[in-house]
Image (cartoon, helix red, strand yellow):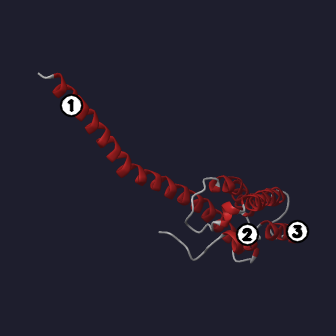
């Protein structure tokens, strides 16, 4: 067999492998990156939905619609979830209800999230010592859960993804 033909065959085999690997990267990798991005969005939305549901339960307690026996448990859940919330936004993945301003104004956003976590923890600690209908506890809960200004700046409620 001619040495040139052998070299050409070896080259074609290597070229074929490279083309197959390149095709794999071009076709499969974007969907993996996209899936990871969607996973990050889904995760942070789960965290924020947990906060929303717990705040809703506390709203019912403060309104007197349901007994306040679980006030401390709801506040503890919010305090724990609030500690995780900022971490859920660390991957810079646009989408969901988060506006791009979250990452453009990261210092302000993280300051607000840390303050929310601190105030939630303070309210949870107070709830262990006070009755659910104590006005001071009610004020502390309302202060801790004043989410509107942050949501006005960093949340796009009309941009929900399914």
The answer to whether the residues at label 1 and label 2 have Cβ atoms under 8 Å apart is no
Q: Nearer the viewer, residue 123 or 49?
A: 49
Residue 151 position, x and y percent, is 69, 71
Tell me if residue 42 comes above or below residue 148 in the rendering. Answer: above
> Real-space Cα distance between discs 1 and 2?
64 Å
As drawn, the residue found furthest toward the right would be 136
**Which residue is drawn at the image coordinates 73% and 69% (left, top)?**
150
> Real-space Cα distance between discs 1 and 3?
84 Å
Could you tell whether 101 is left or right of 97 in the image? right
The answer to whether the residues at label 3 and label 2 have Cβ atoms under 8 Å apart is no
Q: Earlier in the sequence, mark 3 or mark 2?
A: 3
Q: Earlier in the sequence, mark 1 or mark 3?
A: 1
Q: Which residue is mark 3?
A: 136
Q: Quadrant of residue 19?
A: top left
**Which residue is drawn at the image coordinates 41% and 54% (left, top)?**
31
Q: Nearer the viewer, residue 129 or 37?
A: 37
Badge 1 element:
helix
> Real-space Cα distance between discs 3 and 2?
24 Å
Q: Earlier in the sequence, mark 1 or mark 2?
A: 1
**Which residue is drawn at the image coordinates 55% and 60% (left, top)?**
41
Q: Which mark is residue 150?
A: 2
Tell me if residue 134 comes above or below residue 123 in the rendering. Answer: below
**Residue density around tag 2, few if under 14, some if 14–19, many if 20 or more, within 10 Å:** some
**Residue density around tag 3, few if under 14, some if 14–19, many if 20 or more, within 10 Å:** some
Residue 131 position, x and y percent, is 83, 65
Badge 2 element:
helix
Q: Which residue is mark 1?
A: 8
């Amino acid at each position: 067999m001619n040495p040139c033909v052998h070299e050409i065959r070896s080259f074609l085999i290597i070229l074929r492998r490279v083309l197959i690997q390149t095709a794999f990267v071009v076709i499969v990798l974007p969907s993996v990156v996209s899936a990871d991005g969607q996973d990050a969005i889904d995760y942070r939305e789960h965290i924020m939905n947990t906060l929303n549901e717990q705040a809703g339960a506390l709203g019912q307690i403060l309104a007197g619609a349901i007994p306040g026996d679980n006030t401390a448990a709801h506040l503890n859940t919010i305090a724990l979830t609030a500690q995780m919330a900022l971490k859920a936004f660390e991957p810079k993945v646009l989408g969901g209800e988060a506006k791009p301003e979250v990452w453009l104004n990261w210092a302000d956003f993280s300051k607000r999230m840390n303050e929310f976590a601190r105030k939630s923890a303070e309210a949870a600690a107070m709830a262990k010592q006070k009755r659910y209908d104590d006005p001071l506890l009610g004020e502390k809960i309302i202060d801790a859960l004043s989410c509107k200004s942050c949501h006005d700046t960093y949340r796009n409620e009309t941009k929900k993804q399914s």
